[in-house]
Amino acid sequence: MSSFSPPLAPLGEQAGSARARPYLAHSRLLAMLGLALYVVSFFLIAVGGGNFSDPLRGYNCALFAFFDPWQDSNFLRSSPFEYFSLLIGGWTNLLFLAATVFGFWKPGSRAARALAVAALVCIPFCWVVFACETAFPREGHFAWVVGMVLTLAATMSAEAVEHGKANVRDDRD
């Protein structure tokens, strides 16, 4: 009989205490929920109004934010503040994915923590672009942010349990 091994299974195997296992299971569940929400957000409407003729889906926003700063040289000259905000906001997804991979692969590493912080710091730059374009965030943007925060929080809390930094209480005593 084969058993299902969740993606965060190595975290559970590395935890030395049987008392930590329920916390790791919750972390795995939250990480999977966060990743699912993150993926779904790309298919929802993320931005509406403003200078956009039609509402944009999350994947359109991601592609636009990542590639447009490299293609439009006039954009830098006409609006440098918005340009750099778009440039920084465009790196959010790559930083998040790298932080998630490092968080699963090497929990507690400096790289995982630094990438997670960098990804979260990039999010407000998207809001600057919204303001400059007189656009507003829609459900896809909120799902995107919540998905990232949930995933990163779950991987960081699993790392804390693994290294004994969390206050683990045994209810059986």
Image: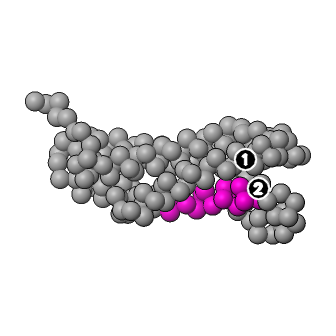
Name the residue: 23% across, 44% down: 20
Rendered position, 76 above or below 131: below
| Residues shaded magenta | 83-98
Q: In which quarter of the image is the C terminus?
A: top left
Q: Is residue 28 visible?
A: no
Residue 99, position in %: x, y? 47, 59
Q: Is mark 1 on a helix, strand or loop?
A: helix
Q: Is residue 21 magenta?
A: no
Q: Which of marks 1 and 2 is nearer the N terminus?
A: 2
Residue 91 image offset from top left, x and y in percent: 63, 61
> How far apart, in angstroms, are the residues tagged by discs 1 and 2?
9 Å
Residue 26 placement: quadrant: top left
Residue positioned 58% across, 62% down in the render: 94
Question: Disc 1 vs disc 2: which is toward the camera?
Answer: 2
Residue 83 makes an appearance in the image: yes
Q: Do the residues labelled 1 and 2 touch (CB within 8 Å)?
A: yes
Residue 139 on image: x %, y %: 68, 37
Which residue position holds label 1?
128
Residue 110 in the image: x percent, y percent?
A: 39, 62
Q: SS for tag 2?
A: helix
Characterize the local packing of mark 2: few (<14), some (14-19) or many (20 or more) Cα atoms within 10 angstroms.
some
In this picture, residue 47 sits left or right of residue 18: right
Residue to which mark 2 is pinned: 81
What's the magenta bit mostly, secondary-structure-wise?
Answer: helix
Q: Is residue 76 above or below residue 61?
A: below
The magenta stretch spans residue 97: yes
Under mark 2, the amino acid is Phe
Which colour assignment does the render follow? one colour
From the viewer's perspective, is 119 left or right of 41? left
